[in-house]
């Protein structure tokens, strides 16, 4: 094998491929000795040859076959076999030079197409940060990071931090520009980065209400011609002028922005025109505002603009145009899908799964909110224009109802009818309100329940509890899950003192609506009536967690702690009441009473006196203050309080006697004598006054002492006779009753008649120490209505007051009512 070599082509190793190879000539196969021999023997099934060197197909050992030793032969065209080695040079595999083979591979070299024998690649060369280009890139990244941090801080409400980051970004951006100029790359200034820095800084100034600085920053951007579309920022400048109430400047900048925005941006132009109309409304220029709103309604109508247009027509009092604007308002397309789309079908499970997934998604919530907003604007507009478009508000409401019935908002017609009844209530026309509500008895269940709830409430206020109970039952029949109806039913049972049953209705209302505060409040009152104070306390503590600033709830908590004999807790809750209602005289008086029971007279005096300042007609407070000054030996100061009591109850002699007593105690005997004489003229039968007159005249040595002594004896004698007559009348009355029990009923009646008449007459006479005018004293009914007094024990009705948050701040009642 040492003399066996493979043929190697010197010049072109790939030559000969286009030559015809007679081996593939099938016609000569019969004459081919080698082929015939291979067919007859196992010559064609010999094992493959192994390579002597890696990457070759020829081995170094001879191959043994049936014919003995064989040597590799060249191809029939004289081309060397692939992979053979000749003269120490290895021939590469055909057409695979790119995989790492080379024609100059020497004998004994290994196959290494990936070049791994050369060792690991050298490390990457580090960037040289000292070059101007690298410094500029690093600085640009820092500016972008600062802008992003500023925006993130603003999104979480950290406005001051956002402003600081924006200012720092501005400083670094200016340093970046200077560095570019120094490096000779001034023409490569990043305008987008400069624009972002200035815009963010202006926005942060505006968010922090630093309006002059924000306007200056916006002005820098707008005046720079290198910034494209910078004119749109005049809208931001106009918004700042609106906040500053510089409405003419705001109009000017809105119009400048409108001129710089092409008609291709239709939606943006519509929004700017809407802002212009709103500013004109604030300026009171309704005609100019109408022009803007009418253009918007003709180009791209929307609910908010339609409502604003109605407000402008209402402001100028144009009835016909109000009607047309209302018709346009209810015909504005909302662009939302029908609710039937979200009703699942029974056939297609895949569709039902899709519907279940989308019926509460963000898009459906947005559609619902848009529909609720549209209904709110339509209801408010109808209530606003109904009294103005016709001669009477009833006719106007009827017109609005007819228009709404013929629109896509047909379900609002019933709500308008209920609002018509509420308007009657505001006009104190209760009969018309009741008649209007009664028309809903044959309507669908929802409307019937709302109308019956309001009727029950009205009859409850009029103390017609039977009718209130009837309509409460009707409302519950129409809608058993109506918490307002259940509360009204509970109230009718409450006034009949069936507290256990009332509590059940309130509990059911809470099960239907756990956030119903009226039911929880009334349940607490019911437990209080049943002396279940711990349960009542639990109810009011839960209610306090919902209504943190409700003075009524805190007062009830104070009262419950007082009943539980925990005065310190009661005092704490009353102090919280005063933190909400600083000038409530009843709470101040109650706090004074609690401090007095605890023995803290100074604190009690402070709160009693504050109560007197805010409500100087409370007899109990006046009496306590007067007694306090007498106890502390300041009788002169007590006089003003007893004189106030005299003005409030002029038929009560005791207050005038207290005034005279204070003069006497303070040593002013002359004034005391005059006061006693004045009391004697008004109440000549008063024994106590005559006694003090006799004593004073005696001490002062006056000649009138005998006259008053004689009058005193007469009055005392009359008092004795009166007592005897009363005593004898009682005895005869009791004797008559005994005789009546022993004899016939008629006899008993006849024998006791005279005694009863005498007894009644005696009882009608005043006592010896009271004048005849004071025989049936009546306290003056003060005009003050105490918000935390006994009326708080009355249960709340199940109706609710709903305040609409519209431009006119019109407080309106919803389907359910609350007592005024």
Image: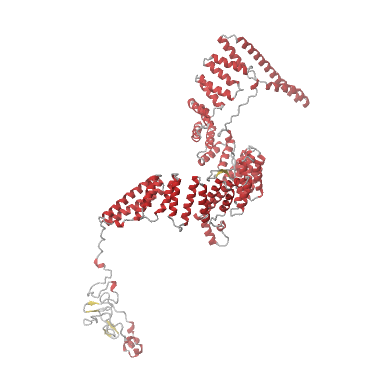
Task: Look at 66% across and 46% down and name the residue there.
Answer: 438
x and y, in percent, of residue 558 in the image: 52, 34
x and y, in percent, of residue 45 in the image: 34, 82
**The N terminus, quarter of image:** bottom left
Q: Nearer the viewer, residue 657 or 178?
A: 178
**The C terminus, quarter of image:** top right
Residue 420 lies, with reference to residue 362, above or below; the image says: above
x and y, in percent, of residue 430 in the image: 64, 41
Residue 212 lies, with reference to residue 115, above or below; the image says: above
Q: Nearer the viewer, residue 106 or 285?
A: 285
Task: Look at 57% across and 12% down and name the residue there.
Answer: 696
Is residue 480 visible in the rendered structure shown here? no
Residue 496 horizontal side relative to residue 623, left or right: right
| Quadrant housing residue 751 | top right
x and y, in percent, of residue 652 in the image: 60, 22
Q: Nearer the viewer, residue 162 or 576?
A: 162
Is residue 1 visible in the rendered structure shown here? yes
Residue 70 lies, with reference to residue 578, above or below; the image says: below
């Amino acid at each position: 094998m040492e003399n066996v070599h493979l043929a190697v082509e010197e010049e072109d190793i790939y030559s000969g491929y286009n030559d015809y190879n007679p081996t593939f000539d099938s016609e000569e196969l019969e004459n081919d000795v080698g082929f015939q021999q291979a067919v007859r023997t196992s010559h064609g099934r010999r094992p493959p040859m192994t390579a002597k060197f890696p990457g070759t197909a020829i081995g170094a050992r001879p191959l043994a076959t049936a014919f003995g030793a064989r040597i590799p032969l060249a191809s029939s065209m004289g081309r060397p076999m692939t992979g053979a080695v000749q003269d120490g040079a290895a021939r590469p595999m055909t057409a695979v030079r790119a995989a790492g083979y080379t024609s100059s591979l020497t004998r004994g070299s290994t196959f290494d197409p990936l070049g791994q024998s050369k060792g690991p690649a050298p490390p990457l060369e580090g960037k040289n940060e000292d070059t101007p280009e690298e410094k500029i890139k690093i600085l640009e990244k820092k500016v972008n990071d600062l802008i992003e941090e500023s925006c993130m801080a603003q999104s979480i409400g950290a406005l001051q931090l956002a402003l600081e980051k924006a200012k720092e970004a501005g400083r670094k951006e200016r340093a970046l520009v200077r560095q570019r100029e120094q490096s000779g790359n001034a023409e490569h200034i990043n305008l987008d980065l400069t624009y972002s820095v200035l815009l963010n800084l202006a926005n942060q100034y505006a968010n922090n209400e630093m309006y002059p600085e924000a306007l200056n920053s916006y002005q820098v951007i707008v005046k720079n011609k290198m910034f494209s579309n910078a004119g749109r920022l005049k809208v931001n400048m106009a918004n700042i002028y609106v906040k500053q109430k510089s409405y003419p400047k705001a109009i000017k900048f809105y119009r400048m922005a409108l001129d710089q925005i092409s008609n291709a941006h239709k939606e943006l132009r519509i929004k700017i025109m809407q802002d212009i109309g709103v500013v004109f409304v604030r300026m009171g220029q309704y005609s100019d505002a109408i022009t803007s709103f009418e253009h918007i309604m003709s180009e791209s109508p929307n609910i908010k603009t339609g409502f604003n247009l109605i407000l402008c027509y209402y402001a100028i009092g144009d009835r016909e145009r109000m009607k047309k604007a209302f018709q346009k308002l209810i015909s504005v397309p909302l662009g939302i899908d029908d609710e039937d789309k979200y009703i699942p079908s029974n056939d297609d499970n895949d569709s039902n799964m899709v519907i279940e997934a989308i019926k509460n998604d963000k898009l459906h919530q947005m559609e619902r909110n848009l529909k609720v907003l549209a209904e709110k604007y339509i209801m408010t507009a109808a209530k606003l224009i109904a009294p103005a478009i016709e001669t009477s508000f009833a006719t106007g409401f009827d017109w609005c109802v007819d228009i709404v019935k013929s629109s896509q908002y047909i379900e609002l017609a019933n709500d308008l009818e209920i609002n018509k009844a509420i308007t009657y209530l505001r006009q104190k026309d209760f009969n018309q309100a009741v008649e209007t509500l009664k028309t809903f008895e044959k309507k669908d269940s929802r409307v019937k329940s709302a109308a019956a709830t309001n009727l029950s409430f009205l009859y409850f206020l009029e103390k017609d509890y039977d009718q209130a109970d009837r309509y409460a039952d009707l409302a519950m029949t129409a809608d058993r899950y109506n918490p307002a109806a259940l509360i009204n039913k509970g109230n009718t049972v409450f006034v009949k003192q069936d507290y256990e049953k009332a509590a059940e209705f309130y509990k059911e209302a809470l099960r239907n609506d756990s956030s119903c505060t009226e039911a929880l409040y009334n349940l607490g009152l019911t437990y209080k009536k049943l002396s279940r104070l711990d349960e009542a306390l639990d109810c009011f503590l839960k209610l306090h967690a919902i209504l943190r600033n409700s003075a009524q709830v805190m007062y009830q908590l104070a009262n419950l702690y007082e009943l539980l004999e925990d005065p310190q807790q009661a005092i704490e809750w009353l102090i919280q009441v005063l933190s909400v209602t600083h000038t409530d005289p009843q709470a101040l008086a109650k706090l004074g009473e609690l401090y007095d029971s605890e023995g803290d007279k100074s604190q009690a005096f402070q709160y009693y006196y504050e109560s007197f300042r805010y409500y100087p007609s409370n007899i109990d407070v006046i009496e306590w203050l007067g007694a306090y000054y007498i106890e502390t030996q300041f009788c002169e100061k007590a006089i003003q309080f007893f004189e106030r009591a005299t003005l409030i109850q002029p038929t009560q002699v005791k207050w005038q006697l207290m005034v005279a007593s204070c003069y006497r105690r303070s040593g002013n005997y002359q004034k005391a004598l005059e006061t006693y004489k004045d009391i004697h003229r008004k109440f000549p039968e008063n024994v106590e006054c005559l006694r003090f007159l006799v004593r004073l005249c005696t001490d002062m040595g006056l000649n009138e002492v005998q006259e008053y002594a004689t009058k005193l004896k007469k009055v005392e004698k009359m008092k004795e006779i009166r007592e005897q007559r009363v005593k004898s009348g009682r005895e005869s009355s009791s004797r008559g009753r005994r005789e009546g029990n022993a004899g016939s009923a008629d006899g008993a009646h006849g024998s006791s008649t005279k005694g009863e008449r005498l007894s009644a007459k005696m009882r009608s006479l005043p006592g010896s120490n009271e004048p005849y005018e004071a025989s049936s004293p009546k306290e003056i009914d003060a005009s003050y209505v105490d918000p935390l007094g006994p009326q708080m024990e009355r249960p709340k009705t199940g109706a609710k007051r709903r305040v609409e948050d519209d431009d006119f701040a019109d407080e309106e009642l919803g389907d359910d009512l609350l007592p005024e």
